[in-house]
Structure formats: C-alpha cells, structure tokens
Image (cartoon, rainbow, N blue to C red):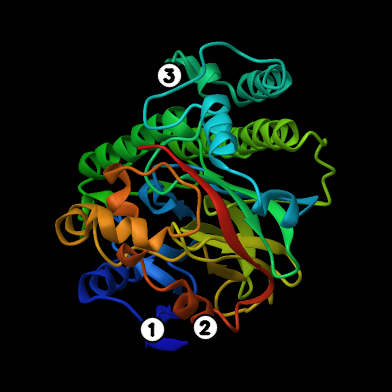
Amino acid sequence: MERLSARLLSWASLIDEKTLDQAHTTARMPFIHPHLALMPDAHLGKGATVGSVIPTLGAIIPAAVGVDIGCGMIAVRTQYMVDELASRDLAPLRQAIERAVPLSAGHQNRKIVATAEPRIAELENLAEKAGFDPAAYAGNWRLQLGSLGSGNHFIEVSVDELDRVWLFLHSGSRGIGNRIAMHHIGVAQRLAKQWWIELPDPDLAYLVEGTPEFARYIRELRWAQHFALLNREEMMDRVARQVSDFLGIPVDEQERINCHHNFTESEEHFGKRVWVSRKGAIQADPGRPGLIPGSMGTASYVVEGLGNRLSLNSSPHGAGREYSRTKARSIFTHEQLRAAMTGIEFRDTDAFIDEIPQAYKPIDRVMADAADLVRVRHTLRQLVNVKGA
C-alpha cells in the first residue's frame, strides 16, 4: 500500500497517470472521509475511478457508484468433478447456456419464466415500498431479469484446484439500473448548476443527505442493487439447469456466493458513519466470502476478506482494464484471442477481441497487490466461457 496523499491510498502497483489524476481529483472532494482507497485493479472511469472505494460524509456522488448499479458476481460450487466434463465435447453445453440466457446489450427475455415470477413479484413489492414505478425508467424491466448483457459480463463453467466444478457469472442491473443511475447523475448535475457549485468534473456532482433528491436516490439505488442480485440468481438457476441436463445428473449445490462490486452502503469507519461507494470493489470484512474474476481466459478467485481497516474492508473486483476497448481492437488480433483461449470452449468470434486477456492487467499481479486485503480460498480455471457481443 502506498499513501499518495492525506486523502488517497493506493494498492495498485500498475496504474497510469490519467487514472491517478482522476483519483486525486475525487479524493479532494470536501466530504471524503477519511480517504479514498484505490484498489489494485484501478483504471479510468466515468467521473470516479473504477476500482476505488469512496467514503463520503453526508453526500453521495451517483457516478461514483457506477452506471451499472449492483453489478457483481455469483458462483456456485457443484458436486461435479472435472472428469465428468473434460472428456466431452462442451460446445453443446455452451450453446444450451446461450439459448437459456439472453446475451448482449439490449437483449431480453421473450416471456417471464416460472423461476423469474417470484423474483419479479419481490421486486414489484420493493418498488411499491420505495414509492416509485420502475416502468417509468424501462417499461420492459421485468423481461430484463435473467439477462446477461455484454462487455466484460460472462458466464463460465470452471474447476478449482481440487478439480471441483464451479458455475460462475458476472452481471448487474441491466438497462433498468443504467437508466436509474443516469437519471440521478443528471439530477445531481442540475442541482450543482442551480446552486452555483463549481466541480472539477461534472460527473462528480453529488446529492446531499437530508434532501428529497438524496432520499429518492437511495430508495431507487437499493432497489436496483437488489434487482442485480436477483438477476444473477435467476441466471444461475438457468445455468445450473442446463448443466444438469447436459450431464444427466441434477446439480447438488455445495456453496453459493453472490456479491456486488458497484454499490453503496452506510458503514462505520474511523469513528464516523459514512456512505461507502465501491465502484469496482467488493466488501472484504473479516471472513466475508468474495469473488474476484480474472479476464477472459485467465484464472478467477474465490476469496475471503481480511478486514483491512485502511482499505475500508474492501478488495479488488477483477483484473481491471489496461487498454481501452478501442485501443485493444487496434492492437490485438483474432488469432491472439484464439491462442489465449486455447483449451477453453468459447464462441470464436472477433467480437470479443476487446475482451482479450492482454487488454487487462495481469490477474496474478492484482492478486499479489491484494495480499493484505483478501485470502485466496480457491483458484478457478475456465472450461466453458459464454459472453454477449
């Protein structure tokens, strides 16, 4: 860990100047308490750095939570062993998962399936209690539940160091969460202009605790966070069903972990009750289980928190981009992607060039930087990878 200023601590040994400048700018906001913590996977983001932990007194920066509210990971350890999969052609399994879960931006379910019905009812009840109608943001939000999205979102079948099979996926609150986030970022920016508040970046506009705008944001934020959690649960149930059908043996779930890495919670740190916005970071309280994925084609990790006080009990959420998507497409090739994915069943298309492992920081380096934040429980390697273009 390196103390870069009184209000900025960093665990990132690989970080560029633009990201550092952005983090310093955020750390100078007057309500940061006690400091901003940069995670090992930190990289440039909208307003605030992805891979940062931002504790605030009496205010929240909506862009510092991120536009994919509640984005995170879920993993299930099954009773299967690698031998039950390794000798088989895994393309039919990948294709079955791709049919069961809508992939890519803008794609959604055609109908509400039985497993989604109780989850949608739960979300309808929560929205009513929160005093808002999600349909005002996205009329089709119910059909979005159980869909993956694109970018770095994925579904994987993996094995750990004991050859046990895990099901693993990464997604968030989809279009509905994005629209909620963008609305409140806009509200914060409008209020800043109304009250002549000078900001170093318009995306650092904030909402002040005790105002109606803040209260509404928290209600809708928490709803979106829960949508994201249930979205992952719904997809995991579908993936488990496809694996069960493929092997002819029902999944016997041994362990399940579901954690956010784009979210806000009210917590106590350094003697103050603060809002902790983790934008690309997971909670790492002592003993808390967590998930840190690598990039496409590399290892992922099941971890438990060490409760590092200076990190505000946090850890990285993944490898973190080293090259932008545009830059990655300009310097890497389809053949390099194929080479990186050797031995892994995946949809072989140049649509995923910007997700090539070389576009991300080396996950081993990230985990070494996080040695005082988490303990590794299991290391996972991929057998099947599913992504949306």
Amino acid identity at mark 3: Ala
Amino acid identity at mark 2: Ala
**Looking at the picture, does residue 238 appear above or below residue 118?**
below
Q: Position of residue 201 (x, y in %)?
A: 21, 56
**Looking at the picture, does residue 91 appear above or below residue 282?**
above
Look at the image and tell me in which quarter the C terminus lies: top left
Count of numbered tags: 3
- Horizontal side of residue 271 vs 368, given as left or right: right
Q: Are marks 2 and 1 in contact (CB under 8 Å)?
A: yes
**Residue drawn 64% across the image and 24% down it:** 123
Amino acid identity at mark 1: Ser
Q: Position of residue 28 (x, y in %)?
A: 32, 71
Q: Position of residue 369 (x, y in %)?
A: 49, 82
Residue 343 shows up from this direction: yes
**Residue drawn 34% across the image and 80% down it:** 14
Neighbor class of circle 1 (other Cα within 10 Å; few <14, some 14-19, many 20+) is: some
Please tell me the numbered disc located at residue 58: none
Residue to which mark 1 is pinned: 13
Residue to which mark 2 is pinned: 368
Sequence-wise, the earlier of marks 3 and 1 is 1
Q: Secondary structure at mark 3?
A: loop
**Looking at the picture, does residue 21 appear above or below residue 170?**
below
- 112 or 128: which is nearer to us? 112
Residue to which mark 3 is pinned: 138
Residue 71 shows up from this direction: no
- 103 or 163: which is nearer to us? 163
